[in-house]
Image (cartoon, rainbow, N blue to C red):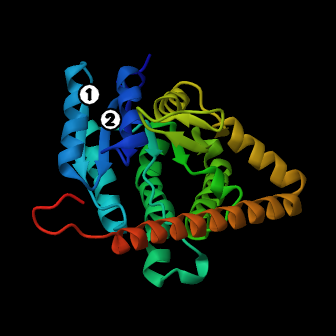
Amino acid sequence: MSAIAANRTAIVTGASRGLGALVAAALARRGVAVALLARDREHLERVAARIRTTGGRAEPLPVDLSDWNAATRAAEAALARFGHIDALFNVAGAKLEGPAEQATYDDAVTALAVNYLAPLALCRAVIPAMRRQGGGLIVNVSSVLGLRATPDRGLYSASKAALNALTDALRVELAASGIHVTLVCPGRLTAAGERGSWLAMSEQDAAERIARCMDRPRRRLTLTLAGRALDALNRLSPNFVDALLGRIRRRRAARDVCHADESHARRRAADLAPVAAPGERA
């Protein structure tokens, strides 16, 4: 076993909380030294401390991933600290919701900067080093919504679709260099303490599945049964999926209107209720 293989290293973005932090911890349990990238220094330090208490090695590197140059410098800093980078896990994501017609230019730029441009900047920074060492792994965490957009998530879906395309291109471009490229498309994930269902997967389980790519790289990993079903159904009958999603959106809108009416009625009833005079009971 080479020295690099015995001392594996990885960069994990979005590592200050949620899925990114769990992926970093899962890698550390496998003996991988991890560079933790995210904007929140305090949360990064906490994640690093938890990893170190279990015997792992973690280096927090606070960075604003929406800044192309800052993201590049962070990857270079990780390479300088570890001496080599075996894997890059692009987990960070910016999720924006709302109708596309209401989106602003800044909304679109934010989605693309974090979900697409940051992974591209980091890939560009680590690929030369991976080539020199004879191989490596890039794992881009996208979304099922990058395979099939849904209403009110157009900007998010578009940025993830761009990441999907980038990942497919990199896979072919880097194959001869021994660099494996994996696309991960999670469906709905639940945080610790949240109630799960067959439609969702826990963030912990998803993190373990993603971390396994370190030992067994995959071409694509689509998480959750519902996510795989949506992808398959959309390829089989996209018109049906259009109609289904439209119906779901209309029902949700009707339910929101009903809840708003009920809330208004309760406030109106409270306004009309008699007010007790001082010293009297209502």
Front one among 188 and 136: 188
Left or right relative to 191: residue 36: left
Q: Quadrant of residue 16?
A: top left
What is the secondary structure assignment of the residue under circle 1? helix
Q: Which label lies toward us, 1 or 2?
A: 1
The percent coordinates of residue 233 (x first, y second) are 83, 49
Q: Quadrant of the C terminus?
A: bottom left
State the residue lying farthest toward the front.
Answer: 280
Q: Residues within 10 Å of mark 2 (few under 14, many from 20)?
A: many
Q: Is residue 171 above or below residue 96?
A: above
State the residue lying farthest toward the left.
Answer: 279
Mark linked to residue 34:
2
Q: Amino acid at mark 1?
A: Ile
Front one among 137 and 37: 37
Q: Is residue 282 above or below residue 141?
A: below
The percent coordinates of residue 132 (x first, y second) are 45, 42
The percent coordinates of residue 3 (x first, y second) are 36, 22
Left or right relative to 112: residue 35: left
Mark linked to residue 78:
none
The residue sitting at 20% across, 22% down in the picture is: 53
The residue labelled by disc 1 is: 51
